[in-house]
Image (spheres, helix red, strand yellow):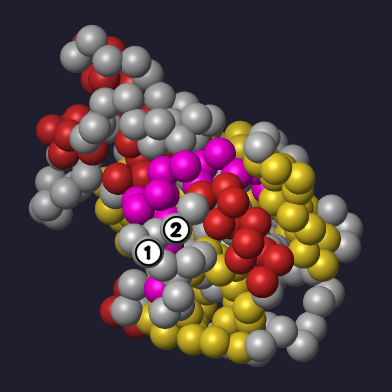
Amino acid sequence: MKISGIHLYPVKSLSGITLERAELGERGIAHDRNWMVVDDVGRFVTQRQMPAMARIAVRLESDRLLLEHPEVAPLAIELARSGQPSLTAYVWEDACRALDEGPEAAQWLKTVLGDWKGSGLRLVRFAPDERRAVEPFYQQGENAHTAFADGYPFLIASEASLAALNQTLQRKGLSPLPMNRFRPNIVVEGAAPFAEDGWSELGSPEGYRFGIRKPCQRCKITTVDQATGNIAIPGEPLKTLMEMKTQPFRPGAYFGQNATLLEGRGQFIAVGDSLLD
């Protein structure tokens, strides 16, 4: 097996960035889900509520984060910025200390996305000294933590599994889907379809090693076209994944595996790296 794709999502639920190499950290790929959009009470807002978020492009430069949309000038946020007011942000049931990126970012989001059920939107950054633990039940002694990801620092997906899903979709007369519907961090090739569901670890001769911890239950975001923000066929590919029973003992639709970092903090991964399970 080898790595065929690496993807970074600096702002939760906005567009991703495709990389050739990336630095590994305990909280995931460097800068992954380090920012998030929240409502007036600090609750996270994603494509589940606002599919148009997919149309906001994200770029990382050496000293700043850039958000881009075809209808407005880009928003620039300094990476080294400090001194922002803090607030409590909520991801599912977790409360995290976050830093508010300010009124300019809030106005930019309002211009692009509007309000969410009468609430304004704000851009927040994960506080550098904050620690959000991965659910302990699925850990095996690694004491893993993450930033604003749904629950785990890494999401690993397989090209063969996507091909199997697409074959099933096409037999139903539906169009195949690109991997970006599933927003993985690391994509692998050379494994059998859904072989990842039987892995406990995934590592490289380079010295880094991931713990495969929990199948990823999929949500409405997989129905959103990541280029347009549109939902062409509500419910797909979720219905097809449930029919395929990729996790026969778990109700719901599953694709990919949540993972933690066991070894290799500070190392770089690259497209083409060999992997062993």
The quadrant holding residue 125 is bottom right
Q: Nearer the viewer, residue 144 or 48?
A: 48
As for residue 61 lying within the magenta part, the answer is no
Is residue 99 depicted above or below 256 in this figure? below
Question: Seen in the image, is 61 located left or right of residue 246?
Answer: right
Q: Amino acid at mark 1?
A: Gly
Is residue 161 depicted above or below 65 in this figure? above
Q: Residue at x 39, y 36 (%)?
A: 224
Q: Dot 1, how many residues are within 10 Å of its Cα: few (below 14), some (14-19), or many (20+)?
A: few
Tell me the element at label 1.
loop
Distance from disc 2 to disc 1, alpha carbons, whole Å, reads 6 Å
- Marks 2 and 1: CB-CB under 8 Å? yes
Q: Dot 2, how many residues are within 10 Å of its Cα: few (below 14), some (14-19), or many (20+)?
A: some
Tell me the element at label 2.
loop
Q: Position of residue 45 (x, y in %)?
A: 42, 62
Residue 118's disc is: 1
Residue range in magenta is 43-58
Q: Amino acid at mark 2?
A: Asp
Q: From where the camera sits, is residue 192 visible?
A: no
Q: From where the camera sits, is residue 146 visible?
A: yes
Q: Residue at x 55, y 57 (%)?
A: 110
- Name the residue that disc number 2 marks: 115
Residue 135's disc is: none
Q: Nearer the viewer, residue 205 or 197?
A: 197
Q: Residue at x 63, y 61 (%)?
A: 107
Q: Residue at x 70, y 66 (%)?
A: 104
Question: Seen in the image, is 273 located left or right of residue 185?
Answer: right
Q: Position of residue 145 (x, y in %)?
A: 51, 78
Q: Position of residue 128 (x, y in %)?
A: 68, 83
The quadrant holding residue 274 is top right
Q: Nearer the viewer, residue 189 or 222?
A: 222
Which quarter of the rendered picture does the N terminus lie within? top right
